Image (cartoon, helix red, strand yellow):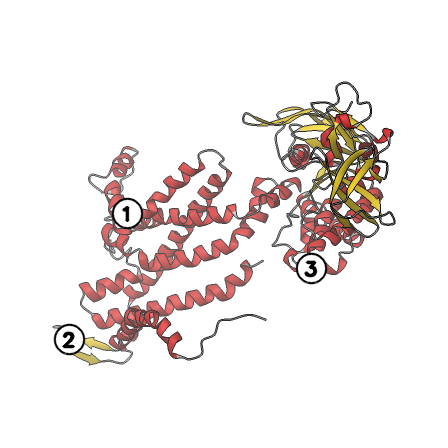
Amino acid sequence: MATVSLSGIKKSFGKTDVIHGIDMDIKEGELIVIVGPSGCGKSTLLRMVAGLETITSGEVSIDGNRVNDLEPMNRDIAMVFQNYALYPHMSVFDNMAYGLKIAGRPKGEIADRVGAAAKLLQLEPYLKRRPRELSGGQRQRVAMGRAIVRRPAVFLFDEPLSNLDAKLRVQMRLEIKQLQRRLGVTSLYVTHDQVEAMTLADRMIVMNGGVAEQIGAPLEVYANPASEFVAGFIGSPPTNFMQAELAGVPPASAVTLGVRPEHLAITTDTHKVRGAVLYTEALGAETLVHVKLADGTLVTVRQNATEKLPQEGEDVALTWGKADEMHFDASGKRI
Amino acid sequence: MEKRVTFKGIWLPLLLVLPQIVITAVFFFYPAGQAIWQSLFIPDPFGLSMRFVGLGNFEYLLGNPYYRASFVTTAVFSTLVTVVSMGVALYLAVLADRLIKGSGVYRTLLIWPYAVAPAVAGVLWLFMFNTRVGVVTWYLGLLGYDWNHVLNGDEAMGLVVVASSWGRISYNFLFFLAGLQAIPKSVIEAAAIDGARFWTRFRTIVFPLLSPTTFFLLVVNIVYAFFETFGVIHTITAGGPQQATTILVYKVYSDGFVGQDLGSSAAQSVILLFIVGLLTIVQFKFIERRVHY
């Protein structure tokens, strides 16, 4: 267990700056999710912590020690890769034991530690198999097992679930969460999937274009997005963005008004914002109503299945609570 | 279920494979059959008649010390060529794989020697090591070493090995580099995080993952050393001095076309055919089993 601190982390490839300065202090045992669209620098950030990329400027410390110039092997970390990166010519046992063997641990200890990890991950029946004889979920477990047996101070996960099918992803997500809780190891987890970020994170970093747009607990980020980007990225369907004038009394510098789909409601009150229903999506428990406003803006209303479903093409009026309004200025910042 | 396109009759498919069969028959089965047939005869000194001797040619060859020496020469030569050309190629490929800038130039330059015909390569090396006008010989002379591959059998062997390996390094390099680049980068990174330094990673991860490439090259290079090095040997040493570089293929040529003993030459070809067949079977049976993961 360890603390990790990032201060002023920057990264450039040649003249291209990809990360513009990230600061964060991670507490012991915390699970931090780095989330953002592809190309936002989230994997690069993780790889800098791992030591697989050089740090252009800034400082990474693990447990208070600066690790910038340490080799990956000396940073006391373990990493789970997107494609698992298992050694294809070794058995599951050898894959997990590789690091310990190199460290020169006695055979008995290696067998014990690998055995314990295999038991924890329900991999015991597969120890003699080669990776190609395993399913995607099992390979994923072996990759985690390889990380666990080394008992590192920090776990790094680089989109570990993106190669799995949707159902397995939900299941493994839960397993990772439980495992992390149980082992209490400080973890950094990179994903582009905001649902994964919401469900796994103790705190999350929402990244965009090499900048940390917001750092905070998932629900706090959801309820109080710091920027237009975060409001649009976190939550599905995303926050509706409308012209600021549609709010009753917008702040002076407001350009955009954001309202989450669940805060919009269709009303009979005629003098509110009006639009035409484009189409509706009934998802069972809830229904999404897509409405085109008079000025051409598309918005989504999320309503319970029990509420009255408008017809496609029907003219409707929309309403929302004053407290649910989010105002953003021209640069996308929250006001 | 596997879906296959099937033909109704037998004639169309036969027609389609006919060109391949004809080529194989004309250029392989017929000459191979001729060789086997001729190996059972001895021609008279004027080449006017042939006398049937059964396995006499084989009996004579296997009892002949020169022929047996040629076996040893071939074994030494092909082992050295294979080890040198593959070893150097692997080393260069590992270096090229680590390069980020200029790897294209490096690669292109390394491929060039492959475009040089073996006989021409032989002449190039011959000029460099010529006992009277060779550049390398002259420098070696300055260092106090008297290079003379025309008299010294070991030096002759060294020279033909180097000349034969030289062009081959390019070919092996290409395959090794492709093999190295096919290894997922994340596997190497995982090993680095697991604590393996460069050499350990190479020994435990990279080399095992390269084994299909290595095996393929092993087979191809041994066959090369056995058969395709004729041009190099012919131009540099012509099998000498004192048969020190007469490998089996060269002996087939010198006995048959220089010595005009076609029966013995044919018998040697048959033995060669047999050896290469055997080598290939052994390689596929025993080595290939261990290279798949």
Distance of mark 2 from mark 3, alpha carbons? 67 Å
Q: Secondary structure at mark 1?
A: helix
Q: For residue B262, what is the image quadrant? A: bottom left
Q: For residue B227, what is the image quadrant? A: bottom left
Give B177 or B149, whichever is nearer the viewer.
B177
Q: Secondary structure at mark 3?
A: loop
> Residue at label 1?
B121
Distance of mark 3 from mark 1, alpha carbons? 50 Å
Q: Secondary structure at mark 2?
A: loop
Give A297 or A224, whichever is nearer the viewer.
A297
Amino acid found under the numbered disc labelled 1: Ala
Amino acid found under the numbered disc labelled 3: Lys
Distance of mark 2 from mark 1, alpha carbons? 38 Å
Residue A253, x across and y down, in percent: 75, 19
Quarter placement of the C terminus of chain A? top right
Q: Is residue B195 above or below residue A5?
A: below
Q: Chain of mark 3?
A: A
- Tally of numbered tags: 3
Do badges 2 and 3 share one subunit? no
Q: Chain of mark 1?
A: B
> Residue at label 3?
A128
Task: Specify whether A159 is left or right of A25.
Answer: left
* Point 35% across, 74% down: residue: B15
* Numbered badge on residue A11: none
Residue A146, x across and y down, in percent: 71, 47
The answer to whether one can see residue B234 in this image is: yes
